[in-house]
Amino acid sequence: MASYNRTRRISEEIKKIIGQMLINGIKDPRITSMVSVTDVEVTNDLRYAFVYVSLLGGNEEESLVGLKSSAGFIRREVGKKIKLRYIPEIMFKVDDSIERGMYMDNLIRKVNEENSSKVEENEDEADE
């Protein structure tokens, strides 16, 4: 349990640091998308940090390449701000949960519209 809490705290701290770096510190011209860090998962042995990012607008693939090429710089900066024996290797992954959520929302909305139109048709038939 203590190990889980420690990795969770480290994950949250890395998320804050990388979020600030995306606002202020990374000047890679390939990163044209609006990038936000949605989650960070650190392995139990603290060797890897999987950084989930949401990329909106711009060239998403090129932005991801820019982030991956900046991983060494980001890792070094994280190491300056967090005192750990071993600084996790930063691995970027695209988080598509926002798009999946919007897709599911549209499906639910469509089903609700179909159901409400069927209910109205049944009420009209019952009135006759």
Image (tube, rainbow, N blue to C red):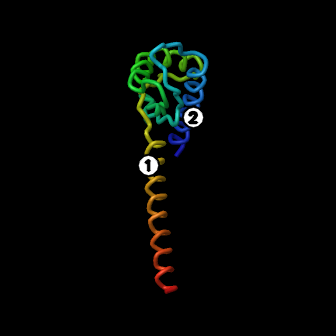
Question: Secondary structure under badge 1?
Answer: helix
Q: Earlier in the sequence, mark 1 or mark 2?
A: 2
Q: Please tell me which residue lies in front, 49 or 68.
A: 68
Within 10 Å of the Cα at label 2, are there few (<14), some (14-19), or many (20+) other Cα atoms? some
Within 10 Å of the Cα at label 1, are there few (<14), some (14-19), or many (20+) other Cα atoms? few
Q: Amino acid at mark 1?
A: Tyr
Eye-nearest disc, 1 or 2: 1
Please give the name of the residue rendered at 43% of the width and 56% of the height, measured from the top-left corner.
Answer: 107
Q: Please tell me which residue lies in front, 122 or 12.
A: 122
Q: Amino acid at mark 2?
A: Glu
Q: Position of residue 68 (x, y in %)?
A: 41, 21
Left or right: 114, with 78 as reference point: left
Left or right: 21, with 99 as reference point: right
Above/below status of 39 relative to 28: below
Classify residue 114 by image quadrant: bottom left
Which residue is disc 2 drawn over?
12
Instruction: Give the tally of numbered discs.
Output: 2
Q: Position of residue 30 (x, y in %)?
A: 44, 16
Q: Please tell me which residue lies in front, 7 or 16.
A: 16
Left or right: 18, with 50 as reference point: right
Mark carried by residue 38: none
Left or right: 72, with 84 as reference point: left
Above/below status of 37 relative to 107: above
Q: CA distance from mark 1 to mark 2?
A: 28 Å
Which residue is disc 1 drawn over?
103
Outermost residue to the front:
128
Q: Position of residue 104 (x, y in %)?
A: 44, 52
Classify residue 90 by image quadrant: top left
Q: Please tell me which residue lies in front, 74 or 62.
A: 62
Question: Secondary structure under badge 2?
Answer: helix
Please give the name of the residue rendered at 49% of the width and 85% of the height, measured from the top-left corner.
Answer: 126
Classify residue 88 by image quadrant: top left
